[in-house]
Image: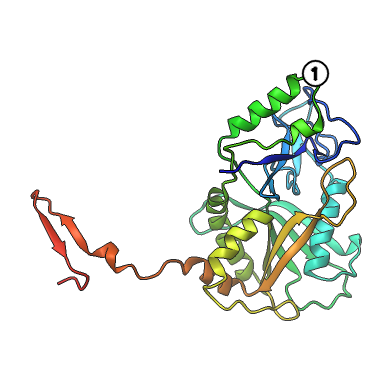
Amino acid sequence: MAGVTVAEYLGQRTDVDDITLAPAVEGALCPFMDGRKCHKKVPVCSIRNKGKLWIVCENRLCSSKKTVPDSINPKKKIKLPLSSYQKEVLMSIAKVSFSPELNESDVAVKREVPLKANDQSDYSADFVMTLHNGKTQLAGPDRVVLEMQGGGETSNTGEITRHIATWAENTQRTNAMLRQEIAKVGTIETNAWRRQQEQFVVKGNVALMTWKGYGIIFCVGELLYDYIWRKIESKAVLPSLKEHNWTLAFLEICEDKDKPVHPGSLPLKVGRRLFTNYQTFVHALINQGEPSLDTFAGEFDRLDGTTINIPRDGH
């Protein structure tokens, strides 16, 4: 395992030396939540694995949180306005998915929207996005479930914590020290997708069953896009339906390396994208594996303590 590097610390990219980053203090503010306190003990927002971004904070890509407890009366909830950063991310997704000519007044969203499911499980969409300008002619749906999964957990997370502590305690610390490779740490795409796939299947199906037939936009980080694409690329012919009746948009959110390097957060953009049919995509996901005759043949243990050799043909 080669290791990872810290890409962003408390909203600041580490690959610059114009300013020297300082350790976070208690009550430090999250730059992606419009001045709300960072909830992380170690405020690493994202890391790089083999040069690709992996988001490790739920608020980094585009938080769907819509309420917070009132500071005076904690039982009361206060609605959070969309931050300028959230608006920027949502607008970029809307322009890629629907039309580059959209204005902010054309796009509307709801956050953490409950969805009905047959098994009574609690499901909610990160966002429901709709266009309501009365002028844009769309090839696909005009209302969609929008799901965000920029990354997830890492293996040996304690190594990252120790690395940050060592950097913070060094009186001669530099950004170069902060971005040094942390060995034996990796990204766990498998777990991220396992947690997401049931949600993806249920939420997409709910969208398509709803009146008129809506759709789903699934935004994932670079490494997760790679992981999912490897599972489906050879399993089915996925029609490109951007100019037709698409029901699924599969979008990669990646680092925008064309932007100038300046202190601050890393710029993101929509990279690879696929507009296709939701059912075909799901079929490709579940159509995994291939015949494995040796699995079902060979030496078996009988329950009476003896063994038997079963041939491939089962007789």
Q: Is residue 146 above or below residue 234?
A: above
Residue 15 at x, y = what percent?
81, 41
Between 162 and 278, the one nearer to me in the picture: 162
Between 94 and 77, the one nearer to me in the picture: 94
Between 5 and 36, the one nearer to me in the picture: 5
* Residue that appears at 83% across and 26% down: 22
Residue 78 at x, y = what percent?
79, 37
* Residue that appears at 76% across and 27% down: 73
Q: Residues within 10 Å of mark 1 (few under 14, many from 20)?
A: few
Say what amino acid the circle numbered 1 marks: Thr
Q: Is residue 103 above or below residue 120?
A: below
Quarter placement of the C terminus = bottom left
Q: Secondary structure at mark 1?
A: loop
Between 186 and 218, the one nearer to me in the picture: 186
Q: How is the image coloured?
A: rainbow
Query: Can the viewer see residue 92 in this picture?
Result: yes
Quarter placement of the N terminus = top right
Disc 1 marks which residue? 171
* Left or right placement of residue 106 versus residue 237 in this view: right
Query: Can the viewer see residue 131 in this picture?
Result: no
Residue 148 at x, y = what percent?
69, 54
* Residue that appears at 50% across and 59% down: 118
* Left or right placement of residue 192 versus residue 119 in this view: right
